[in-house]
Amino acid sequence: MPPKRFTVGRSVVVATFLATLLLAAASVGAGPVGRPAEPAAAPARVPAAGPGDPQPGSPAPPAAAGAHLEPVLQEHGLLRQARRSRPGAPAVASATVGPPTAESPPPEPSGIPPRAAAPSPAPAPLSPAPAPPAPGREDPAPSLPRDRLLVLGYYTEDWDGDTRSLESLRRAGTRVDLVASFQFRVTAGGELAGRAYPRLTDRARRSRTPVLALFHNYAGSGFDRGIARSILATAEARERSARAVAWTVREGGFAGVNIDLENIPPSLRGAFTDYVRRIAAHLRPDGYLVTISAPAKLGDERQNGWTGAFDYRALAPLVDLFVVMAYDQHLPGGPAGPIAAPDWVEAVIRYARSQIPAEKILLGVPQYAYDWIEGTTQGRGLSVPGAHGLAEKSGAPVLWDEGAGSGLFRYTDPEGRRRVVYVEDRRGLEQKLVLARKYGLRGVAIWRLGLEDPGIWPLIDGYRR
């Protein structure tokens, strides 16, 4: 692979402006939580946010078909410039991108359910070129630090105007080395649907922070197994989708890609590995980063409905960084319990290290809370500040549960029901940072920016020296 460096040039600015123009040209009108061991279908999301953690309104209906890209480029005098900055790009790249919804969030937005993607304004897919552009990208992927703990942050915008991840990124400053933008949904046809995040692009340009285009199969209330099956079923479908991913990364000015497909049928294990291999073949030779987000495993249960499709050992050589999502040990839909207990996380790390080089592993760490009705499987997600605010309002002390490795409190809700809350705050993160250092891992990946305990950033400083 060629040397990797990161320079945010004119191409990123142009790409963002073009995406914004497409959104404006389209006709007006028109998000992840945990994972049970053996889901028959896509898992449900946490049903509701807690006090101080509002849900945005329902997304608008899908947009009508939008305008073609070339006339828009010609009108704004950017076509020649875009072609120059992207050698080999197609002369016409059609796109029908729906506009974001214009709903306003409720007051005091402090958090939403963790692993919940944006409510998604249901945009139409970006149409890829028949083949990825020729090599020659101006802004190759970055050379990431190797002398300290690497920190990746997951970024989302859950409604138009949602700035929580952006504000978190600003607070973090140089402590975040790499951003994975939860921005694109893969369709059953293998294309990508998404919308522009101009605020993130502007921030990344000014701070010189590389951004990965994260694509996923989250739709409705869970990760869609049908979409995964459609894009992986045949070699032709895998190649079509791989080219769509490569085209989006190149044309969008991204540093690389994060592959976050979940709830894949275990029977498609080999097909998924081949899919990642195809994406890597399109991107890695030109210096783009290829990364993956994979569920935590304690062993290789090939028939497991959630983890069986992920062949750690076969996937490892194909990617630059391998995020092991070591969270959601317990989650709503199941009984109350720790989100990422230290002994469980350590077992996850030990298995991962037996399959993946430690220098590629990013330990996925949670920064959120779960709130259950005691004695049931009913629960919801909270941001860490939202959970702390709820505890204060309820007069409930947040205790430290050593076995769970997290904060814990109980309270009675307005309906008279007893509830129990597990909170993954800075104290829980410190235990996981100790484990990452103990096992020589490359770094950590935080789910997610905007839900975290603000106290984690000074803490991280001490583990990056």
Image: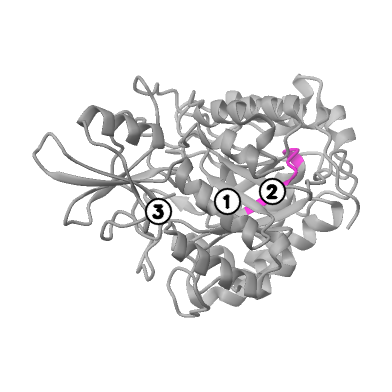
For marks 3 and 1, give the one nearer the viewer. 1
| Residue 26 seen in this snapshot | no
| Start-end of magenta stretch | 251-258
The answer to which of marks 3 and 1 sits earlier in the sequence is: 3
Q: Label 2 near label 1: C-beta < 8 Å?
A: yes
> Mark 3 is on which residue type?
Gly
The answer to which of marks 1 and 2 sits earlier in the sequence is: 2
> Mark 1 is on which residue type?
Leu
In the displayed structure, 286 sits above or below 271; it is above
Q: Position of residue 64 (x, y in %)?
A: 50, 34
Q: Which residue is mark 2?
A: 149
- Outermost residue on the left side: it is 416
Give the quarter of the image for residue 96: top right
Q: Is residue 450 left or right of residue 11?
A: left
Q: Residue at x 59, y 23 (%)?
A: 24
| Residue 446 seen in this snapshot | yes
Q: Position of residue 101 (x, y in %)?
A: 45, 28
Q: Position of residue 464 (x, y in %)?
A: 69, 43
Q: Is residue 416 left or right of residue 239?
A: left
- Foreground of the two, 303 or 360: 360
For marks 2 and 3, give the one nearer the viewer. 2
Dot 3 falls on a residue whose secondary structure is strand
Q: Which mark is residue 125?
A: none
Q: Which residue is mark 3?
A: 222
Q: Which mark is residue 433?
A: 1
Q: Position of residue 196 (x, y in %)?
A: 61, 32
> Mark 2 is on which residue type?
Leu
The answer to which of marks 2 and 3 sits earlier in the sequence is: 2
- Asked whether 254 falls inside the magenta stretch, the response is yes
